[in-house]
């Protein structure tokens, strides 16, 4: 699984071409609920407004990796490098033969015909980036306009945010009446554990309504200690404990915009045994919850 050489953002690390085989055996129907496809650039160009240009990570490599890791299904999330052009995402969904679902990025001008086409391809939600350092641009009004259009389709919203942005996005959270999934453990400072003010605020929000879901993903972005990311375990375990019916797991392959190190995806999967030793909860996180959200 070698990434094709191309001009990419300086300092951008390519994904691990030779991850270890996980020791854990995932349950039948296991779903990686957060991964991406990028390019190839010669077929699906990257957006000129993107804050980074990634290494190509096409669908063929994703599907091969998923099988190697033990996942039978995937949720492919559109990332900002492709902007609102969801062509690479749709291409991957169509090739997956119903084993994948998608999360798109769309603008407020999208019409019902375009949304219907995305739905037919397997898209089931939209993603909003609230992280200012990643050049988040959409206004609150534009985001709410998009939510109004997707609600009749039964879609949900995926949001990428950080604790310092929670006050600013509160009006958005109060203004939507569709499920909201927080990416990457809400990016709480995992090194502080599950008793810090940032986590306590996230917990209060998550348990305030059954509209809110969370992804236990990206310890490699949040850890201060590096592999095997032990300092992220307390937060991960607590989230699985408090939200067993609304928690998802994702690898975030191919780990866009990582500059410190590139994780071993086999190690990330093996981490499941450590943060979720209970097989009933593990099945909920990997099989039952994504099935209910994406395949029913």
Image (cartoon, rainbow, N blue to C red):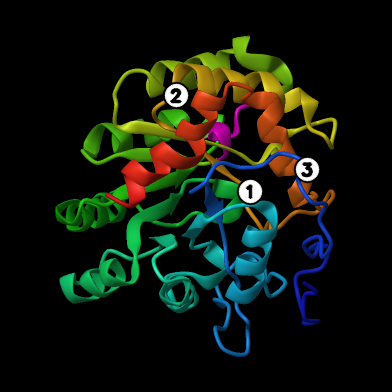
Residue at 41% of width from left, 53% of height from top? 127
Q: Which residue range is magenta in the image?
A: 184-189
Q: Nearer the viewer, residue 262 or 129?
A: 262
Secondary structure of residue under mark 3: helix
Image point (72%, 34%), residue name: 271
Q: Main secondary structure of the magenta part?
A: helix
Is 212 located above or below residue 260 in the figure?
A: above
Label 3 belongs to which residue?
Answer: 267
- Between 253 and 160, the residue placed more toward the observer is 253
Total marks drawn?
3
Q: Could you tell me how far apart the alpha carbons at marks 2 and 1 are, in whole angstroms?
A: 18 Å
Q: Which residue is at 31% across, 52% downward?
A: 143
- Measured as percent of width and height from the top left, residue 251 is found at 63, 48
Q: x, y (%) of residue 48?
A: 57, 78
**In terms of sequence position, does the residue under pointer 2 or pointer 1 come before the other?**
2
- Return the residue at label 1: 251
In the visual, does 88 lie left or right of 98?
right
Q: Quadrant of the N terminus?
A: bottom right
Question: Residue 142's quadrant in the figure?
Answer: bottom left
Q: Inspect this view and state whether residue 189 appears.
A: no
Residue located 51% across and 41% down the image: 183
| Residue 185 sits inside the magenta stretch | yes
Where is residue 60? Give x, y as percent. Answer: 62, 75
Q: Which residue is mark 2?
A: 244
Give the SS element for disc 2: loop
* Crowd class of label 2 (few under 14; some 14 to 19; many from 20; radius 10 Å): some
| 208 relative to 51 in the view: left or right | left
Task: Return the disc, 3 or 2, that comes first in the chain's sequence.
Answer: 2
Visible in this render: residue 101? Answer: yes
Q: Is 248 inside the magenta-drawn segment?
A: no
């Amino acid at each position: 699984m070698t990434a094709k050489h191309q001009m990419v953002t300086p300092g951008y690390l390519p994904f691990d071409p030779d991850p270890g085989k996980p020791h854990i055996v995932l349950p039948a129907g296991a779903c990686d609920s957060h991964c991406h496809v990028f390019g190839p650039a010669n077929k699906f160009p990257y957006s000129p407004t993107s804050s980074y240009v990634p290494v190509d990570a096409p669908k063929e490599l994703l599907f091969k990796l998923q099988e190697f890791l033990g996942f039978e299904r995937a949720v492919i999330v559109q990332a900002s490098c492709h902007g609102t052009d969801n062509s690479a995402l749709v291409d991957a969904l169509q090739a997956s033969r119903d084993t994948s679902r998608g999360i798109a990025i769309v603008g407020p001008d999208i019409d019902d015909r375009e949304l219907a086409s995305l739905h037919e391809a397997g898209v089931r939600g939209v993603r909003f980036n609230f992280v200012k350092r990643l050049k988040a641009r959409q206004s609150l009004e534009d985001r709410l306009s998009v939510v109004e259009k997707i609600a009749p389709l039964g879609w949900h919203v995926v949001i990428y945010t950080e604790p310092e942005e929670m006050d600013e996005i509160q009006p958005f959270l109060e203004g939507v009446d569709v499920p909201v999934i927080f990416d990457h453990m809400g990016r709480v400072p995992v090194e502080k554990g599950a008793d810090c003010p940032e986590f306590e605020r996230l917990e209060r929000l998550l348990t305030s309504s059954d509209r809110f879901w969370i992804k236990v993903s990206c310890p490699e972005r949040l850890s201060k200690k590096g592999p095997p990311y032990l300092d992220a375990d307390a937060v991960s375990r607590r989230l699985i404990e408090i939200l067993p019916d609304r928690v998802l797991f994702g690898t975030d392959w191919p780990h866009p915009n990582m500059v410190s190190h590139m994780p071993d995806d086999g190690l990330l999967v093996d981490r499941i045994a450590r943060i979720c030793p209970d097989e009933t909860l593990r099945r909920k996180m990997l099989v039952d919850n994504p099935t209910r959200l994406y395949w029913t």
